Image (cartoon, grey):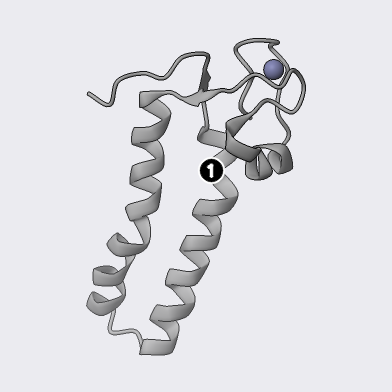
Amino acid sequence: MPICQNCENEWTWLQSIVAFKMKCPHCGKKQYETNKSRQRRLWLDFLPLAVFPITVLLGLSLWATLVIIIAVIIASFIFHPFILKLSNEQEPFW
Ligand SMILES: [Zn+2]
């Protein structure tokens, strides 16, 4: 789970999901996602797209494909707080 770099309190899963504008629920200081965390999240966000060709290769029906893709989207949403790493300052994108 993400740890606030200002007050070093760990955010709960729910706090990570609902953190309004990435403000720490403990100290109120704005936190930023680190570049590494952002890159991991990008992979997670593209996972549903990667699943699609696999379901086509396996010859799955449209319904099975939809169910799997929705499950992957939900799973990536659930796992997001586990890969979220926080920083006190916004890192440049490159
Ligand atoms: Zn804090």
Q: Is 63 situated above or below 17?
A: below
Q: Which of 3 and 67 is in front in this view?
A: 3
Q: Which residue is drawn at 30% across and 71% down?
A: 52
* Residue 62 picture location, percent across and down: 36, 88
* Residue 5 picture location, percent across and down: 60, 12
Q: Residue at x 47, y 62 (%)?
A: 72
* Residue 24 picture location, percent across and down: 68, 25
Q: Is 30 situated above or below 18?
A: above
Q: Which of 13 and 51 is in front in this view?
A: 13
Q: Residue at x 22, y 23 (%)?
A: 94
Is residue 75 left or right of 50 when viewed as pictured? right
Name the amino acid, label 1: His
Q: Please identify the quadrant where the N terminus is shown.
A: top right
Q: Which of 18 and 71 is in front in this view?
A: 18
Which residue is labeled 1 in the image? 80
Is ligand 1 less than 8 Å from the beta carbon at label 1?
no
Is residue 14 left or right of 80 when viewed as pictured? right
Give residue 21's quadrant in the image: top right
Q: Is 30 situated above or below 66?
A: above
Q: Is 64 situated above or below 21?
A: below
Callout 1: SS? helix
Q: Regarding ligand 1, which quadrant of the image does it lie in?
A: top right
